[in-house]
Image: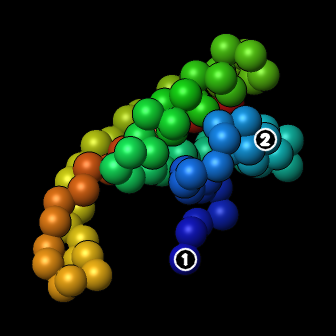
Amino acid sequence: MAEENTVLIGNKPPMSYVLAVISQFNSGSNEITIKARGRAISRAVDVAEIVRNRFVSDARLGGIKIATEQVHNEEGRQSNVSSIEISLVK
């Protein structure tokens, strides 16, 4: 289950996630974490930069964590997937 101040990035257009982050900031949160895995990592970086540069100018990077997670696919095999967590602080 996702935490309250976390936006999980998937296959939607980046502006959908930008809206989610801005909504979190407007509801009183001071720190938002953007999480993504695999091919969605570039979309997560885009979301963080769009929020910082266009909408919330006083937001800054709180930190970036990168990792490799092991997941099991449909055939039962194990594979490694890259993941990223980007923290935005207001």
Q: Is residue 3 visible?
A: yes
Q: Is residue 85 visible?
A: no
Q: Amino acid at mark 1?
A: Met
Q: Residues within 10 Å of mark 2 (few under 14, many from 20)?
A: some
Residue on which disc 2 sits: 19
Residue 71 x, y percent position in the rendering: 24, 71
Colouring of the image: rainbow
Horizontal side of 27 relative to 6 (left or right) equals right
Question: Residue visible at 26% across and 50% down?
Answer: 82
Horizontal side of 43 relative to 82 (left or right) equals right
Foreground pick, 54 / 10? 10
Horizontal side of 80 relative to 5 (left or right) equals left
Residue 16 x, y percent position in the rendering: 74, 44
The span from disc 2 to disc 1 (Cα, nearest Å) is 21 Å
Element class at badge 1? loop
Residue 39 x, y percent position in the rendering: 38, 45
Residue 83 x, y percent position in the rendering: 32, 50
Foreground pick, 10 / 61? 10
Foreground pick, 35 / 61? 35
Q: Residues within 10 Å of mark 1 (few under 14, many from 20)?
A: few
Q: Amino acid at mark 2?
A: Leu
Per the rendering, the mark at residue 12 is none
* Quarter the C terminus occupies: top right
Horizontal side of 72 relative to 36 (left or right) equals left
Q: Please say if the residues under marks 2 and 1 sit with CB atoms less than 8 Å apart.
A: no
Question: Residue visible at 57% across and 51% down?
Answer: 11
**Mark with earlier residue (2, 1):** 1
Per the rendering, the mark at residue 1 is 1
